Amino acid sequence: MDCPPVWFMRQAGRYLEGYRALRRRYSILELAKNPELACEVTLEPVRAMPLDAAIVFADILLPLEPMGVGLRFSPGPVLDKPVRSAANVEGLRDFDVEEDLPYVLRAISLVRRELDGRVPLIGFAGAPFTLASYLIEGGATRDFLRTKAFMHEEPRAWEALMRKLRSVTFRYLKAQVASGAQAVQLFDSWVGALSPEQYRKYVLPHSRWVLDSLRGCGAPVIHFGTGTAGFIEDFSAAGGDVIGVDWRMDLSAAWRRIGAKAIQGNLDPALLLAPKRMLREAVQDILRQAGGRRGFIFNLGHGILPQTPAANVRAVVDWVHNAGAQGEAERATGGGGKIPVNLLDEGQRARKR
Amino acid sequence: MDCPPVWFMRQAGRYLEGYRALRRRYSILELAKNPELACEVTLEPVRAMPLDAAIVFADILLPLEPMGVGLRFSPGPVLDKPVRSAANVEGLRDFDVEEDLPYVLRAISLVRRELDGRVPLIGFAGAPFTLASYLIEGGATRDFLRTKAFMHEEPRAWEALMRKLRSVTFRYLKAQVASGAQAVQLFDSWVGALSPEQYRKYVLPHSRWVLDSLRGCGAPVIHFGTGTAGFIEDFSAAGGDVIGVDWRMDLSAAWRRIGAKAIQGNLDPALLLAPKRMLREAVQDILRQAGGRRGFIFNLGHGILPQTPAANVRAVVDWVHNAGAQGEAERATGGGGKIPVNLLDEGQRARKR
């Protein structure tokens, strides 16, 4: 039996020694803007353990900087000129991927060359809502009140903003694929702050536009969100070849609700800090729910936490890879959707070497 | 057609002028510990608008202070001696409601006397998990990492802590009923940080214990949580006469998933800051989904935000009360569970005067 492919959000990050060493010398933005360093950071986890994909090192907020809102990390992201009015939306600079974010595209080419087909490379971008929330809040937030106020009080400016952002996101992802990304991920990390109705009305059409536009770009798209258990049907209907599911819902329930579609998920990143026995049980529970479906990618429900022991990440990779051989996953009666990815095959080929 | 009863979490709070005036002179703890002031604060919203219940002014963290962990607000809650070990759990002082929180019970008696049967009075307490999260984190948190680490690494200490807290919660709520509360609410505000499996394993048995123990106490119990869309079936199965649902799922979906049970919810508090037309549409949408079910209480998905215009709160109360008369809510074919409350009848009787 095949085992599912496994990779992790933020697999290139502070839990790794090499990354920490580089971060002592460079800021996040310096790393991201230097293709050689970004390439190095991207490759570290892939060299350290048998992950089934590399994920380019970047930050979802990079495209916002050239739009003229300022961007720094201290340590969380801060936008110095947040969007608070229709005039602010109007004033956002248009964005030219090749001109404004050449370093991401260059990093992707470099990584592809270095990987030399060993594992596929995944690119990513923030979804329009999640980008809009940072633009409006000016940084991280708990309650998304400014974002919701803008949405409610300035529906036309909201629409204009979302149209700008969806175009940015689409062009950015398309350019990543053109530069060598073999799959891309659309990150709508904060969409779980919304009601199903708010999602359907203010967000879904724009995510759908991006996902529809990406069809035929030659790379499968993973559509990721957290806290979507209240409207996973709508989230899935917006599109994407693979739907990201976080730990706040059971995988089996997710499949019941969205039908035969590929899913990526859904270990709670906090479990990577738990005792090994408990971590292993949680991994096995996920594999049981995935039931040997081909349309499943083992991942976390959100990014790896900085304080995670690298040995635990490595252990999860091994358990997932051994799952097929040891028969820990039971084959489900129904199919789970296929991952339309040579990516998957490429990853599995790599492991057999 | 009957209209649903309506009240709001944190209806006695900073959005009201009288409360703000008192808060300029007294801290939250000073208000809560002075039964006359707490009574005054409790009554303000009920005098200002035709709400169908009063909710005693208190804070879910009050019982933690006599347990010896320290409690102050600056402005969010801070516990100076958080629980970080099995020894800390062991060292928690046992709690005697009458001795340690006499002021809450006295406030309840005062409010009952002042209300003189006009509307019923609701008491409340934090659920074991939510209390544990504050005890362990030492305050508010975004990711509940310390709580989850404690749960995973110290399962026996976690169990001991939850057993202590469930006893506290039960005795506190029972004493509130004995002092005059006609319904009580169990607040598991942060349970949505968990996976369904974590909820079932580490939390549900303790919530169930509280809810089972309260049966026959003579007051209906509202079981409230947020972010529960991934395991609302389990949350509902833990017990409670009325299940609180937040805005992150549709009411109609909640009823489909938990069956004929009474529900309280589920307006996004952010919508109380939105333009009136939009707020009204959102209220009507909820009433449509409730479809005239008797087992429905109109409320928010979480507490009223401090910056909410009081006029908007008042408008929602009026719209909900007029819903029956104007036929805005459609009668559903299925029943929605009954609120086993003379509370409901008492509220409606009051309005007819």
Image (cartoon, coloured by chain):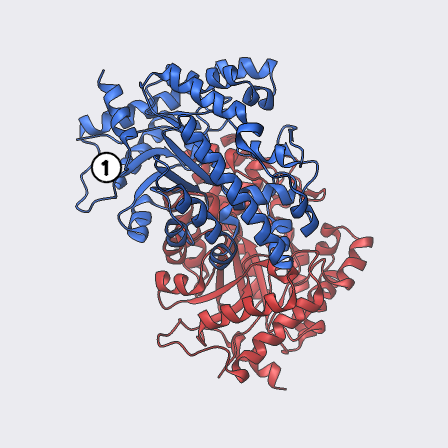
Chain colours: A blue, B red
Q: Residue at x 40, y 71 (%)?
A: B337
**Pointer 1 chain:** A
Which percent across, then down, holds residue A332?
19, 43
Q: Is residue B309 left or right of residue B255?
A: right
Amino acid at the residue labelled 1: Arg
Image coordinates of residue B276 in percent, x first then y, are 64, 68
Q: Is residue A235 above or below residue B280?
A: above
Nearer to me, B255 or B338:
B255
Helix or strand or loop: what does disc 1 sit on? Answer: loop
Q: Which residue is mark 1?
A: A294
B23, A232: nearer the viewer: A232
Location of residue A311 with respect to A253 vertically, above or below: above
Q: Point out residue A312 in the picture as x, y percentages from the top left corner.
A: 39, 23
Quadrant the N terminus of chain A occupies: top left
Corner quadrant of residue A273 = top left
Residue B110 in sight: no
Q: Quadrant of the C terminus of chain A?
A: top left
- Residue visible at 43% across and 49% down in the picture: A208
Q: Which residue is at 66% across, 28% downward?
A: A74
Identify whether A100 is placed above or below A245: above
For mark 1, does the 10 Å Cα neighbourhood hold few (<14), some (14 to 19), or many (20 or more) residues? many
